[in-house]
Image (cartoon, coloured by chain):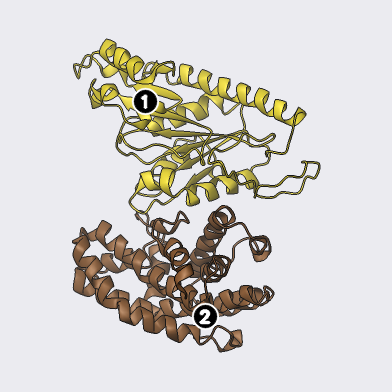
Chain colours: A brown, B yellow
């Protein structure tokens, strides 16, 4: 990441990016219902776990997708799609990832017009689109990874403020404490930028998978996931 | 994606407007947003429009209820529309965000309906009940109806807000309750005119008029106007599509 592209990263990672993320809690809503998250301390633990599992997964795939688009190797994106499918056992979470990916493509087509948006298929996975969006924004794989892992915790943190009425300052303080961890995860994910897609990490959080499947059956819910 | 070639081909591709206003395109459905405060009668109005227009217009509905499927279920339960013509969008506890700041999920629901219902002519997007500051993005709908009710107080039109001042049609609903809640319809009429200039306002009581006749007539007018506009586009330059 250079000084010239920092603004592009801020734009991509901003929660105000109109790409559908605001309606998703990243597993927080079912975790609140199960009383696993009830205050800022339990939220911080939840976010830490999420960053180290699904956050790392998303970061590595975003870094790899970013590197592929930068190298003009867009064909590798299809392989990444299959590899990411294999790493997400929950059908609901696979579907959510593809839905958010589709929405991000729709937004990016206008925000940063580029040929790569045409060949991504109907509903590509979100981390892969995010990596492509980073590349198209002039960013490097490390920035793509950082945007992905930031996204993995910022969304649920906002959902916690809405669902539990947590103090927004205290919630953001928790995010600030997670900063060094997010940087470390992004640096770790960057190492996979040019790796064989089969060798990308496969971290998972079984409880998040189960919670997502359960949440999708609720009759009344505020968030889409 | 903006393109400068003529529309001589018929393959489907996304049309993205870069000027921020949704263009009417030949052969594509008219999108009307229906917004307003909680309990003002949005879902009942949508149901009435479906009953009034359903036989003559190929239509479908997207709901944005706070609790995801409550309004969609109402439309299904009352037999107003079959399952395949209703989509519910989850709004993450922020119904105004889903119709204004980040319209992604609603765009997706609308595109799904356009794909799954050949020849659909009218798409109604009902917002979740919200406050007076909510308004629809011009990137999501072509026209918007704002629904308030007399029981919310006869001062509502004077309080304004983008829905009251700029909606293409303001509906003042539940006029049959006016006497019981001490609402002065003449005050609401006067304030609406002051706020809205030439934009139309209609008074409605779905109890007395279950067909929502004046609103249905306004929608028919929009459909006819759109048909005239789009045929004009088709015979002129197609480069802006």
Tell me where residue B59 appears, x and y as whole percent. Answer: 58, 34
Q: Quadrant of residue B237?
A: top right
* Left or right relative to B4: residue A160: left
The local secondary structure at tag 1 comes to helix
In the shown orientation, is residue A132 left or right of residue A75?
left
Image quadrant where one finds the C terminus of chain B: top right
Q: x, y percentage for residue B217?
A: 52, 18
- Near-viewer residue (B171 or A153): A153
Relative height, residue B13 to residue B223 (above, below): below
Q: What is the number of the mark on residue B165? A: 1
Residue A137 % position (x, y): 54, 65
Q: Residue at x 35, y 26 (%)?
A: B164
Q: Evaluate whether label 2 is on the same chain as label 1.
A: no
Q: Residue at x 41, y 27 (%)?
A: B166
Marks 2 and 1: which is nearer the front? 1
Can see residue A204?
no
- Give the label on residue A87, or none: 2
Q: CA distance from mark 2 to mark 1?
A: 51 Å
For disc 2, the neighbor class at 10 Å (few under 14, some 14 to 19, many from 20) is some
Tally of numbered discs: 2
Q: From what the image shows, is residue B184 above or below residue B114? A: above
Q: Choose top left, top right, bottom left or bottom right for residue A119.
A: bottom right
Q: Observer-nearest residue: A217 or B162?
A: B162
Q: Who is closer to the viewer here, B76 or B121? A: B121
């Amino acid at each position: 990441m250079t000084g010239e592209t920092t603004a592009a990263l801020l734009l991509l990672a901003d929660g105000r990016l109109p790409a559908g993320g605001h309606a998703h809690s990243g597993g927080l809503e079912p975790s609140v219902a199960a009383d696993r998250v009830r205050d800022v301390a339990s939220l911080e633990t939840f976010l830490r776990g999420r960053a180290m599992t699904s956050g790392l997964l998303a970061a590595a795939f975003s870094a790899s997708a970013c590197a592929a688009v930068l190298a003009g190797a867009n064909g590798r994106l299809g392989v990444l799609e299959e590899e990411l499918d294999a790493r997400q056992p929950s059908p609901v979470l696979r579907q959510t990832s593809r839905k958010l990916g589709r929405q991000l493509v729709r937004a990016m087509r206008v925000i940063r017009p580029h040929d790569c948006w045409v060949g991504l298929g109907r509903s590509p996975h979100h981390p892969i689109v995010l990596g492509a969006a980073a590349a198209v924004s002039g960013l490097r794989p490390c920035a793509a990874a950082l945007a992905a892992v930031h996204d993995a915790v910022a969304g649920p943190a906002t959902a916690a403020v809405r669902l539990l009425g947590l103090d927004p300052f205290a919630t953001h303080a928790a995010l600030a404490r997670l900063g060094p961890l997010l940087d470390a995860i992004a640096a770790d994910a960057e190492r996979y930028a040019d790796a064989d897609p089969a060798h990308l990490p496969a971290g998972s959080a079984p409880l998040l998978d189960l919670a997502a499947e359960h949440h999708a059956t609720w009759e009344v819910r505020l968030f889409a996931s | 994606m903006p393109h400068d070639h003529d529309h001589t081909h018929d393959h489907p591709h996304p049309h993205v407007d870069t000027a921020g206003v949704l263009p009417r395109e030949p052969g594509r459905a008219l999108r009307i947003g229906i917004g307003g405060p909680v309990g003002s009668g949005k879902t009942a109005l949508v149901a009435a429009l479906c009953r009034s227009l359903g036989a003559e217009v190929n239509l479908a509905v997207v709901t944005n209820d706070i609790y995801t499927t409550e309004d969609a279920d109402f439309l299904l339960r009352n037999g107003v529309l079959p399952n395949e013509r209703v989509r519910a969008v989850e709004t993450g506890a922020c119904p105004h965000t889903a119709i204004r700041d980040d319209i992604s999920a609603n765009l997706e629901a609308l595109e799904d309906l356009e794909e799954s219902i050949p020849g659909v002519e009218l798409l109604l997007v009902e917002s979740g009940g919200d406050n007076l500051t909510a308004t629809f993005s011009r990137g999501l709908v072509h026209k918007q109806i704002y629904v308030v009710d007399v029981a919310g107080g006869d001062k509502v039109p004077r309080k304004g807000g983008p829905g009251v001042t700029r909606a293409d049609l303001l509906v003042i609903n539940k006029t049959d309750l006016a006497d019981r809640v001490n609402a002065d319809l003449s005050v609401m009429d006067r304030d609406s005119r002051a706020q809205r200039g030439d934009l139309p306002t209609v008074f409605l009581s779905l109890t007395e008029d279950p067909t929502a006749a004046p609103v249905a007539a306004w929608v028919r007018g929009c459909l006819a106007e759109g048909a005239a506009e789009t045929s004009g586009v088709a015979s002129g330059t197609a480069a802006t599509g």
